[in-house]
Image: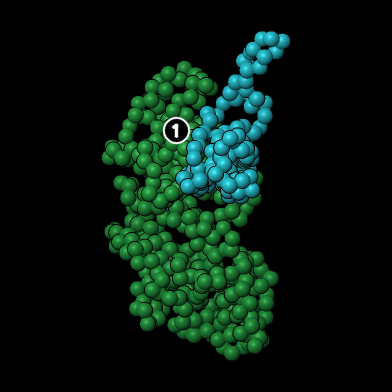
C-alpha cells in the first residue's frame, strides 16, 4: 500500500475509465442481459474504495484493485441470484479466473479494448432508439451517471432513466449480443456508431452555460471512443475523418470563450490558445482518412475544420476553399443547417448581399424557424450592409428564441451595436 | 490538546446514484481529510448491521445490531486533536461526509 504524494489525488478519471472497461468486460462474461449486474458490481467496487482507501491507503495498482473487487462483487451477485440458474457454477469459474488476470498485461488490455468496442457496437444497435443509444453508450462505456447525463443533455433525470430502462429492456427482449455484426451489417452498424459519437460530441460542443465541465467531458469521451473505433481493425477511413473533425474542433475549445464566459467568434479567437496536441492528433487522423476513394460528410467537415486551423496566425483562412467544401457538404447532406453555415462562407467570398440571398429560402424552413442562429446570421449580414434597424429587429427576434446564456449575451452585444 | 472522537453515520444507499467521477471525487476528499495533521487515528467499520449484546433479566444475549432497521449506519470513526469542542466542531464541519448527506457525532475522550 502506498499513499500518493499529493494528499487525496488519484489518477485523473481513474474511476470513470476503469468503470467503462470493467462494465464492458463483465458484460462480456455475464451476457448483455445482465448489464445491470455488471454496473452494480462496479458500483460496489467503487463504494468499497471510498470506504477503505482513505483509511488503509490506496492500493499500489488501484486499477487492478477495482477490477478484482468488481469481479468478486459480480461473483457474489451471480451466486446470490442463482443467475442463469444452471450456468451459475460455470459463470463463477469464468469470473474467478478473469479476476486473477493482471491489469496492465498486454493480452488483458487488448481484451478490455475489444470488450469496450463490442459494447459500443451493441449500444448502437438499430433496435435501440437513437436517443437511447447515446445515453446507453455514455452510461455503460463512458461511466456517466443518470444525473450527469441529464445535466449534459439539459433533460430531466426521469427522462434519461426511462431511456436507459427502455434500452436495457430492448437488449434483453431482442437478445442482443456482443458479437460484431458481419458483412453489410457491419458497415451500417459502424455508421450508427459514428453517428452516435458525432452527436455526443456536438452535444458537448454546443455552447451552454452551467455544467460546462460535464459538456467538455462529453466531447473528450466522444473523442476517446472515436479513437477506439478508429484504431480497431474494422475502422474505415470515415472513422479517422470523424476523429480528425472532433480533434480539430476540440482544439479550438479553450479559445471559444473569454474569461467572463462570453463567446468569441472564430475570427477573433486568440489562436495561441488552441490546443497544439489536439491539432496534431487531428491532422494525423486526417491523413489516415485520405486512404481510399470514400468521401464522407465527416471528411468534408474535417477538411473545413483543418482549413480554419491551418490559417496562419495573422491571416484569414482560405474562405474560397471553405466555400467549395461547403458546396460539397451540401451535395452530401442538403440540410438547412449546413446551408446556413455555408452562408457564412458565401458572405466572406461574395459579400453579405449574396449571403442574404443564399439564406432567403431558409427563412420559411420549418426546421429553422425557431433557430436563433438563422436570425443571428441574418442580423449580422444586415449589419455589415449598414442596415442597422433591420439588423436590430433580427437580433431582437433571435433573443426570443431558445438559446443559452452565453449566446444570449452575444446577441445582446450585437443588438447594442445595431441599435446604437 | 484534548482528543475528540468523530463518529460518522451515513446511509449506504445514498452512494448508489453517484457516478464514477463523483465517487472518485468523494474518495479523494475523504483521503485528503484523513491525512490532516490533527487526525490521530481513523477506522472504517465493515458495512453490516453488527451485533448488540444486552442483558435481559439476567441473561446476556447477542442480537443483530441496531442498524438492521435504521437507514443511517455508523460507518467509521476518527480520533482528532483539538483545543476544545468549538475547535473540534469547526474541524469536523469541513469534513466531506457532510457534503454527502452524512451525520457526524463529536464526543470528547475523557481524560485526554
Q: Colour of chain A?
A: green
The image position of residue A257, as x and y in percent, is 51, 70
| Residue at 33% from the left image edge and 37% from the top image edge | A103
Residue tagged by mark 1? A70
| Nearer-the-camera pick, A126 or B67 | B67
- Image coords of residue A190 (percent x, y): 41, 48
Using the image, name the chain to which the residue with label 1 belongs: A
Secondary element under disc 1, as helix, strand or loop, is helix
What percent of the width, then of the height, locates residue A347?
Answer: 49, 81
Q: Give the cyan chain's letter.
A: B
Left or right, residue A26 beside residue A232: right
The image shows residue A369, relative to residue A142, as above or below, that is: below
Is residue A142 shown above or below A278? above
Specify the quadrant that holds the C terminus of chain B: top right
Whether residue B73 is visible here, answered yes or no, is yes
Left or right of A151, for residue A345: left
**At 44% from the left edge and 36% from the top edge, which residue is drawn?**
A56
- The answer to whether residue A167 shows anywhere in this view is no
Q: Is residue A96 above or below residue B107?
A: above
- Quadrant location of the N terminus of chain B in the rendered image: top right
Q: Residue furthest bottom?
A: A386
Residue farthest right in this picture: B57
**Residue in view at x 43 percent, y 76 percent:** A270
Classify mark 1: residues with Cα within 10 Å, few (<14), some (14-19) or many (20+): many
Towards the viewer: A415 or A183: A415
Residue displayed at 59% across by 69% down: A406
Amino acid at each position: 500500500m502506498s499513499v500518493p504524494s499529493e494528499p487525496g489525488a488519484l489518477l485523473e478519471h481513474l474511476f470513470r475509465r476503469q468503470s467503462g472497461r470493467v462494465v464492458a468486460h463483465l458484460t462480456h462474461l455475464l451476457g448483455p442481459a445482465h448489464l445491470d449486474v455488471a454496473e452494480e458490481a462496479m458500483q460496489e467496487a467503487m463504494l468499497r474504495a471510498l470506504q477503505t482507501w482513505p483509511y488503509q491507503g490506496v492500493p499500489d495498482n488501484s486499477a487492478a484493485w477495482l477490477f478484482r473487487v468488481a469481479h468478486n462483487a459480480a461473483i457474489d451477485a451471480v451466486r446470490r441470484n442463482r443467475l442463469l440458474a444452471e450456468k451459475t457454477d460455470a459463470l463463477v469459474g469464468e469470473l474467478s479466473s478473469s479476476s486473477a488476470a493482471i491489469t496492465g498485461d498486454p493480452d488483458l488490455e487488448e481484451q478490455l479494448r475489444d470488450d469496450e468496442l463490442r459494447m459500443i457496437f451493441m449500444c448502437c444497435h438499430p433496435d435501440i432508439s437513437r436517443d437511447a443509444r447515446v445515453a446507453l453508450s455514455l452510461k455503460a462505456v463512458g461511466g456517466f451517471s443518470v444525473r450527469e447525463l441529464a445535466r449534459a443533455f439539459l433533460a430531466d433525470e426521469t427522462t434519461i432513466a426511462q431511456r436507459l430502462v427502455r434500452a436495457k429492456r430492448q437488449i434483453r427482449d431482442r437478445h442482443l449480443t456482443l458479437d460484431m455484426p458481419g458483412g453489410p451489417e457491419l458497415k451500417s452498424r459502424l455508421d450508427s456508431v459514428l453517428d452516435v459519437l458525432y452527436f455526443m460530441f456536438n452535444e458537448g460542443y454546443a455552447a451552454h452555460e452551467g455544467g460546462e465541465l460535464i459538456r467538455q467531458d462529453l466531447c473528450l469521451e466522444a473523442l476517446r471512443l472515436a479513437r477506439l473505433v478508429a484504431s480497431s481493425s474494422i475502422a474505415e477511413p470515415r472513422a479517422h475523418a470523424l476523429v480528425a473533425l472532433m480533434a480539430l474542433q476540440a482544439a479550438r475549445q479553450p479559445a471559444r470563450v473569454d474569461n467572463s464566459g462570453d463567446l468569441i467568434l472564430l475570427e477573433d479567437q486568440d489562436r495561441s490558445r488552441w490546443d497544439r496536441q489536439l491539432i496534431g492528433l487531428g491532422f494525423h487522423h486526417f491523413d489516415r482518412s485520405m486512404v481510399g476513394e470514400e468521401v464522407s460528410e465527416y471528411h468534408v467537415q474535417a477538411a473545413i475544420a483543418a482549413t480554419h486551423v491551418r490559417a496562419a496566425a495573422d491571416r484569414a483562412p482560405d474562405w474560397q476553399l471553405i466555400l467549395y467544401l461547403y458546396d460539397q457538404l451540401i451535395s452530401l447532406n442538403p440540410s438547412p443547417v449546413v446551408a446556413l453555415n455555408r452562408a457564412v462562407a458565401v458572405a466572406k467570398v461574395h459579400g453579405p448581399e449574396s449571403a442574404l440571398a443564399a439564406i432567403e429560402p431558409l427563412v420559411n424552413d420549418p426546421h429553422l424557424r425557431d433557430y436563433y442562429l438563422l436570425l443571428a446570421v441574418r442580423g449580422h449580414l444586415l449589419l455589415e450592409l449598414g442596415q442597422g434597424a433591420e439588423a436590430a429587429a433580427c437580433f431582437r427576434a433571435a433573443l426570443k428564441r431558445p438559446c443559452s446564456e452565453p449566446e444570449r449575451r452575444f446577441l445582446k452585444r450585437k443588438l447594442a451595436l445595431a441599435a446604437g | 490538546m484534548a482528543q475528540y472522537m468523530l463518529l460518522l453515520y451515513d446511509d449506504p444507499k445514498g452512494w448508489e446514484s453517484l457516478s464514477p467521477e463523483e465517487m472518485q471525487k468523494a474518495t479523494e476528499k475523504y483521503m485528503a481529510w484523513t491525512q490532516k495533521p490533527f487526525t490521530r487515528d481513523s477506522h472504517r467499520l465493515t458495512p453490516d448491521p453488527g451485533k448488540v449484546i444486552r442483558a435481559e433479566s439476567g441473561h446476556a444475549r447477542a442480537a443483530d445490531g441496531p442498524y438492521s432497521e435504521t437507514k443511517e449506519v455508523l460507518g467509521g470513526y476518527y480520533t482528532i486533536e483539538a483545543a476544545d469542542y468549538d475547535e473540534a466542531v469547526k474541524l469536523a464541519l469541513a469534513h466531506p461526509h457532510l457534503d454527502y448527506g452524512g451525520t457526524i457525532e463529536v464526543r470528547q475522550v475523557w481524560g485526554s
